[in-house]
């Protein structure tokens, strides 16, 4: 009996590990050039690139590690009290105190230079947070993105921006006054769709919505 249960657990763990490996390979291949892929791979081994880590939480400056950790733990608790959490693995959260640190893990491209970006959540790789935006809103926004990736898996790449960004903005405490018009439009569209749903309910409903409408909606 114990042996059978052990075998089942080991088989399940192997399946999850294989699933995560496939998702990581797919995520890696979705970036068009090595110039974009290599910085992302650094997110997986942040200590080799100047970060000090405790588990999956890292700070560029060791003296800020406790601040980063308490932010991360607070946000995790807030989200889990609403029934939402990362189930399979916790990606690295990298807290930078310089711009150089941020761009060590994120490559500017012709499509996006990330100059106005507070943080980046790369599916299945991790998150890098710029200096001066270390706050619960930013961390919650990025953690919601990782929960989306885990929940949607490969469909994460097909979800429209209004669903992805609208959800991350709407269920945190971002003030719309400080958003660009592009973001306001995405959040407005999301609000129309989500109504009074909680984040937990919205995640489940988004998968149903995607399955029903995936032929007419595309991501960008
Ligand atoms: Zn976002």
Image (cartoon, helix red, strand yellow):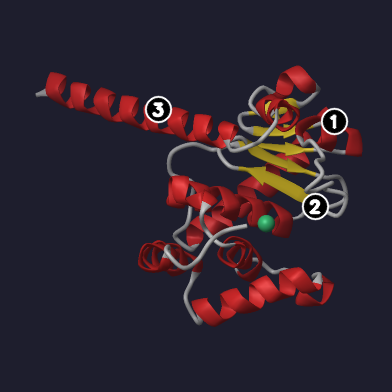
Q: Quarter of the image containing the N terminus?
A: top left
In the depicted view, which residue is nearer to us: 120 or 4?
A: 120
| Cβ–Cβ under 8 Å for marks 3 and 1 | no
Q: Which mark is residue 33?
A: none
Q: Residue at x 90, y 39 (%)?
A: 99
Q: Residue at x 66, y 35 (%)?
A: 32
Q: Which residue is label 2 attached to? A: 118
- Reading the image, the residue beneath label 1 is 61
Is disc 2 placed on a helix, strand or loop? loop
**Nearer the observer, disc 3 or disc 1?**
3
Percent across and percent down for residue 172 are 65, 66
- Name the N-terminal-most of marks 2 and 1: 1
Q: Earlier in the sequence, mark 3 or mark 1?
A: 3
Residue, disc 3 = 17
* SS at circle 3: helix
Image check: 89 left or right of 165?
A: left
Whether residue 98 is visible, yes or no, is no
Asked if residue 46 can be seen in this view, the reply is yes
Q: In terms of image quadrants, where is residue 51?
A: top right
């Amino acid at each position: 009996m114990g042996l059978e249960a052990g075998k089942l657990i080991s088989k399940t763990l192997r399946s999850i590990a294989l699933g995560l490996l496939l998702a990581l390979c797919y995520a890696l291949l979705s970036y068009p050039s090595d110039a974009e892929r290599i910085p992302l791979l650094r997110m997986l081994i942040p200590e080799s690139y100047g970060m000090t880590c405790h588990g999956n939480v890292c700070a560029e400056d060791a003296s800020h590690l406790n601040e980063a950790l308490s932010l991360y733990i607070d946000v995790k608790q807030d989200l889990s009290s609403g029934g939402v959490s990362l189930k399979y693995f916790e990606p690295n959260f990298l807290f930078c105190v310089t711009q150089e640190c941020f761009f060590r893990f994120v490559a500017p491209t012709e499509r996006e230079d990330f100059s106005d970006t507070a943080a980046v959540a790369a599916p299945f790789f991790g998150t890098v947070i710029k200096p001066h935006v270390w706050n619960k809103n930013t961390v919650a926004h990025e953690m919601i993105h990782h929960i989306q990736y885990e929940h949607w898996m490969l469909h994460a790449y097909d979800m429209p921006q209004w669903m992805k960004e609208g959800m991350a903005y709407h269920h945190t405490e971002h003030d719309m006054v400080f958003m660009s018009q592009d973001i306001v439009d995405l959040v407005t569209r999301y609000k129309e769709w989500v109504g009074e749903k909680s984040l937990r309910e919205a995640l489940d409903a988004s998968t149903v919505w995607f399955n029903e409408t995936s032929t007419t909606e595309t991501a960008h």
